[in-house]
Image (cartoon, grey):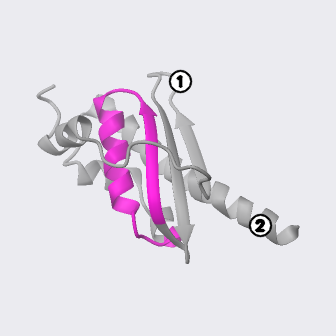
Amino acid sequence: MSFYSKKVMDHFMNPRNVGYIDHPDGVGQVGNPICGDMMTFYIKVHNNRIIDVKFQTFGCAAAIAVSSMASEMVLGKTLDEVQKLTNEDVAQALDGLPKNKIHCSNLGANALHKAIQNYKLKMKNKKEI
């Protein structure tokens, strides 16, 4: 595993924000059928900011590290700020990923974007009721 950066190894060995949120405001799930990685992000939103985020990831060291880093990067951010988060941002925050693991960074940002989409859909449906 020496081809992983120290940050990747730290977030893999000591992942932050692991778990789930009871009654989340938004849930986003993504997977990669080729490698088998699966990520689910749960968010709580207040005043358009993510006030809590948790994740559950089934995957390799890079997938777990990406989930952990992405969760730290978005806590306290506005939904608009999180929507601008890119896969490259997550990989850079981890001091890079090996080329054969870069797809893992796609999963983290994409799952968060889906959680926000899910939250917005719930809010829209509430207003229509």
Residue 114's spot in the image, x, y percent? 59, 51
Q: Nearer the viewer, residue 89 or 22?
A: 22
* Left/right of residue 34 with respect to residue 15 in the rendered view: right
Residue 56's spot in the image, x, y percent? 45, 38
Which image quarter holds the C terminus?
bottom right
Residue at 48% from the left image edge and 66% from the top image edge: 50
The span shown in magenta is 51-80
Q: Considering the numbered disc 2 on the image, is that residue within a helix, a strand or a loop?
A: helix
The residue most toward the bottom is 47
Location of mark 1 (residue) = 33
- Quadrant for residue 64, please give it: top left
Residue 89's spot in the image, x, y percent? 33, 56
Q: Nearer the viewer, residue 52 or 48?
A: 52
* Left/right of residue 120 with respect to residue 75 in the rendered view: right
Q: Is residue 107 above or below residue 113?
A: above
Q: Amino acid at mark 1?
A: Pro
